[in-house]
Amino acid sequence: MATPADVPAATIEQLFAAQRAHQADVKRTTASERIAKLRKLREAIVAREPAIRDAIYKDFRKSATETDITEIFPTLVELKDAIGSLREWMRPKRVATPMALVGTRSYLHYEPKGVVLIIGPWNYPFQLVLAPLVAAVAAGNCVVVKPSELTAHTAQLIAELVAAVFSPDEVTVVQGGPAETQRLLALPFDHVFFTGSTRVGKIVAEAAAKHLASTTLELGGKSPAVVDDTADLHATANRLAWGKFVNAGQTCIAPDYVLVSARRERELVGALGHAIDAMYGADRKASPDFARVINARNYDRLTRLLDDSVARGAKVAIGGERDPAERYLAPTVLTDVAPDAPIMSEEIFGPILPILTYPSLAEAAAFIAARDKPLALYMFGTDQRAIDSMIASTTAGGTTINNTVIHFANPNLPFGGVGASGLGSYHGVYGFKTFSHERGVLEQGRIDALRMVYPPYGEKVSRMMKWMFKLFT
């Protein structure tokens, strides 16, 4: 599918100006009015489920069931949570007031950031656009959505979906490529929500900083999986294989590499082979459930990483088969990987899983801590002290114990990175807060104790302040 024609800067500026003019009205909408919009969005998604599956399949041959699991269902979960909880989220929250301010009361008031920009990725082109959109609408913002041009069929579907639900002065979609993204980033949005690579995230942050716009950066990184000697390797292998090879490994929180003790490495590789066979069959290329690499550029990057690793001494323990005509790269497991190889310095974002061995869990934790903070960390085992020690010794955006990626699916947990893997978080109430300004309000009551410290101060006020110092120190 061809990329839409170039969108002129003047057109983008007009869309932005229309939303800026309309934002005050949207800000004043009630919980009931916002819930009605979210329900309408949900109905539009449900009505288009076959079209969503078809668009994503056309973009990178993702199976309909995998689209249901990873694209449509998580979006519906976000909608259900927002629709059921929005009244509570919007309600002002009372907070404590110190004794020094006796006679006042304090509370938090949530108001929309204003006009916000959501820049979506290609790897989950529906869910990672719609989930933040749900939060932005719930918070009362006007929104410009920029889906990825690499998944053109899904981008067109999102444009049609949004146009059927919202007026363009509230939510609109701008399609196109890097030029359109640059034109959008030149505008003074109140908040920019970006999902993508760390490299591009830095560009987005720099552009937003020129307008003092706040940002949420959902990035990536090398998410490790640590396998303790107490782990059930059969269950571990199944969960690693699913988390790694779903979406052909093109998942920001996929296990990027595995750390296992040398004495259990061979057993884990064998279990991974059985798990991959069970999921994708002996002829993985023929599996209807294994997606393809998004484009030739990424396919070439992955095969270069694989070939370079082998040239440096790594062994292809499982997989390695490829077909450039289909952008097919089999689920692949590498052993004997050099820790300083390029495949261990950049996010893989594809169906290649390096396995490294560690002499002790403490050294495994040190290996992780010496690198950029990952978006996710996975730990397998039953030794609670080892699990607690790993969490205490490392930093990550999120963590799942004895499974992979599923922490993303809980709307009651914040999802986001730290350091190189991101800034800010969303999902559920955390998404509502991301797109809201938390406004502190203090209200003076009938009793005004502060009158006692108005000028002229004199000895009486001086003695009172000395008493206050003793009370608060």
Image: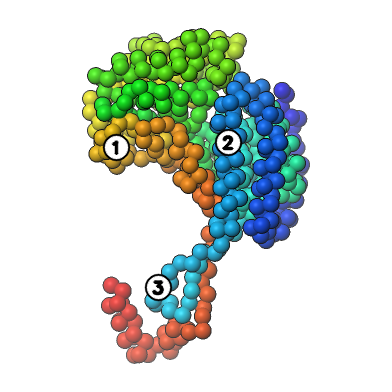
Label 3 packing within 10 angstroms: few (<14), some (14-19), many (20+): few
Measured as percent of width and height from the top left, residue 427 is found at: 52, 45
Marks 3 and 2 close (CB-CB < 8 Å): no
- What amino acid is at disc 3? Pro
**Looking at the image, is mark 1 or mark 3 nearer the viewer?**
1
Residue type for callout 2? Phe
Q: Which image quadrant is residue 255 in?
A: top left
Residue at mark 1 to residue at mark 2: CA–CA distance: 30 Å
Q: Earlier in the sequence, mark 1 or mark 2?
A: 2
User: Residue 244 versus residue 210: which sits nearer the camera?
Assistant: 244
Tell me the residue that label 2 is attached to.
Answer: 73
From what the image shows, is residue 346 above or below residue 75? Answer: above
Q: Is residue 92 left or right of residue 256?
A: right
**Mark 1 highlights which residue?**
387
Q: Mark 3 and mark 2: span between their CA atoms?
A: 45 Å
Q: CA distance from mark 1 to mark 3?
A: 39 Å
Mark 3 secondary-structure assignment? loop
Residue 143, percent from left and from top: 66, 47
What residue does disc 3 label? 98
Q: Residue at x 43, y 69 (%)?
A: 96
Is 263 on the left-hand or right-hand side of 51? left
- Numbered mark located on residue 168 in the image: none
Q: Position of residue 230 (x, y in %)?
A: 26, 28
Q: Quadrant of residue 23?
A: bottom right
In the figure, 246 relative to 136: above or below? above
- 436 horizontally vs 309: left or right: right
Mark 1 is on which residue type? Answer: Ile
Q: Secondary structure at mark 1?
A: helix
Between 166 and 442, the one nearer to me in the picture: 166
